Image: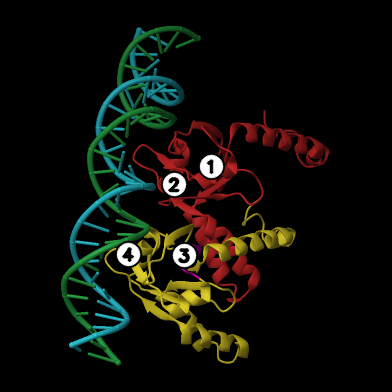
Chain colours: A red, B yellow, C green, D cyan
Amino acid sequence: MRKTFLFMDTITNKVDSKGRVSLPADYRAIVKELNSEIICYRSLTAPCIEGCTEDLLEKLAAEIENSTDFFSQTQDDLTNLIFGDARRFTFDSTGRIVLTEKLLQHAAITDTAVFVGKGRKFQIWSPENWAKEEARIRSEIMKKRPVLNAGKNGEADK
Amino acid sequence: MRKTFLFMDTITNKVDSKGRVSLPADYRAIVKELNSEIICYRSLTAPCIEGCTEDLLEKLAAEIENSTDFFSQTQDDLTNLIFGDARRFTFDSTGRIVLTEKLLQHAAITDTAVFVGKGRKFQIWSPENWAKEEARIRSEIMKKRPVLNAGKNGEADK
DNA sequence: TATCTATTTATGGTATATCATGGTATTTTA
DNA sequence: TAAAATACCATGATATACCATAAATAGATA
């Protein structure tokens, strides 16, 4: 029995001509233990696919519901954008999901997908875009490093 | 057995000369599992049809009941409009509902309907109007992005 | 530590079930 | 009884579930 249910690590899998791709085994385990389902949608800010468990979206829906302004414009827009794009993806007995053409195009994925853990969520990138993104993030971190070091001492990773 | 009952994704189906249109399979599954029925009405704010399960309208009614005079006059008026317009739509064994002329006209739908998930609700648009609306929302949301992120932390995305 | 063995995981291929949709029959109601 | 609304049937396309094999990982033994 695991203690935490966080998506981690970076795993590269193949995408076949039908858009089928194996969800990393560890991700599957999380989804199963949570008795949940995978939800995927286009990232609003990056050329990648984002995924999470149903629970997370359910939480969002509940928040929106309880925020009294049933008739708010911004809320209306947000729900359209998020729920209109998201979809449930059940995996078969061999652990694969079938990504849609829309998602694949947004992430510029053809035959290889890179799963990147982000805790409660994860992302799916094309190898090329992920390489760029990782480089960007690392250089970004390096710039902020002096600040980070003020707090802890250099255990960031290895 | 699913845990969450959220309308999601964007699905395009045909509308025949009688106004018949297939409710997306996943939407049907939700309605069935909730042992509910589809309710549709003209959106108060947009040229589209809005739909939800009976439960949601039930909840709306309860809210009005319990809120003595806390609700503004305008909100009261709005809910009146909804209830005055709403109707139940049962689907046949093949999963189709028959939209009324009134609804179709309001949404300017002729032979194609676009279902857009909104969590507890969904909307039905003409392809043209939905294309415009989606574009509008995306640009609108991008403008407000900093504000959204200030409030919550990283729920919507990041 | 190195080698072999047993599971688990990833992936290609195929059969099956489901879904959307055109058409028709039956029921309702005005 | 005519017109409209509703329920049922048929079919092609699509998506899903299943089977088989290869690769990789973990575990055990020496």
Same-chain status of marks 1 and 3: no
Give how far across and how far down residue B78 sits, in percent.
Answer: 56, 85
Disc 4: which residue: B95
Disc 2: which residue: A31
| Circle 3: element type | strand
Chain letter for mark 1: A
Q: Are marks 4 and 1 in contact (CB under 8 Å)?
A: no
Q: Quadrant of the C terminus of chain A?
A: top right
Q: Do the residues labelled 1 and 3 touch (CB within 8 Å)?
A: no
Label 1, label 3: how far apart the Cα atoms are: 24 Å
| Circle 1: element type | helix
Chain letter for mark 2: A
Label 2, label 3: how far apart the Cα atoms are: 33 Å
Chain letter for mark 4: B
Please state which amino acid type lies under the numbered disc 3.
Ala
Query: Which circle marks residue A104 in the picture?
Result: 1
Same-chain status of marks 4 and 2: no
Same-chain status of marks 3 and 4: yes
Please state which amino acid type lies under the numbered disc 1.
Leu
Disc 3: which residue: B113
| Circle 2: element type | helix
The boundaries of the magenta stretch are B109-120
